[in-house]
Amino acid sequence: MSYSLLHLLHLLGAIGFIGALFYEVAILDRVRVALPGAFSSELSQAVGKRSRQVLHAVVLLVYGAGLGLAWHHREVLAQPFASSFATLLSLKILLALLVFLSFGLVAVLLRRGAMTPVLYRRLHALVLAQMLVIVVLAKAMFFVHW
């Protein structure tokens, strides 16, 4: 697969991933508070179920294309501190791994029944912040040099 196509797929997947999380953190969390308890709970369950269905494919797209892009830059990644590009790309990959682990933690806590609404909101806000830093790093890779 060509680098340009991988780059485009990665970008489109990232837009979907970040957009879904932004919607949940910035909009849906505030709407839930204004709704009656039973309806809020039903809405949360329905949105959560649909989000998981859609986001599985989106995450596969983002991380799959990301692996292809990382393979393309494997020589640069072999020396992560040799250039600003390599350092920023390495940081971006590290944050992407942390995002993956954070969502894994959310899944484990949900399955064990240990997830609280407050913890859920905090973890999602943390993941959104990590993703926004990844976006900044992605832009900086091509414009910041030292």
Image (cartoon, grey):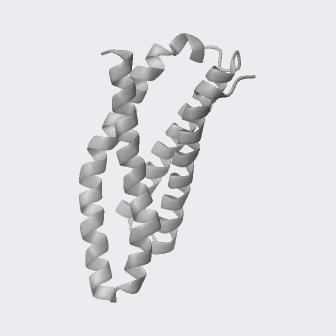
Front one among 110 and 87: 87
Q: Is residue 29 visible?
A: yes
Q: Is residue 114 visible?
A: no
Q: Quadrant of residue 136?
A: top right
Q: Residue at x 51, y 54 (%)?
A: 128
Residue 143: x and y in percent read 63, 27
Q: Quadrant of residue 61?
A: top left
Q: Residue at x 44, y 51 (%)?
A: 103
Q: Residue furthest right?
A: 146
Q: Residue furthest top?
A: 75
Front one among 100 and 4: 4
Residue 29: x and y in percent read 43, 72
Q: Is residue 39 left or right of residue 100?
A: left
| Quadrant, the N terminus | top left
31 in relation to 145, above or below: below
16 in relation to 12, above or below: below
Q: Residue at x 45, y 16 (%)?
A: 71
| Quadrant, the C terminus | top right
Q: Quadrant of residue 115?
A: bottom left
Residue 38: x and y in percent read 28, 86
- Figure disc tally: 0
Q: Residue furthest front?
A: 143
Residue 15: x and y in percent read 39, 44
Q: Is residue 49 left or right of residue 75?
A: left
21 in relation to 2, above or below: below
Q: Is residue 33 left or right of residue 45?
A: right
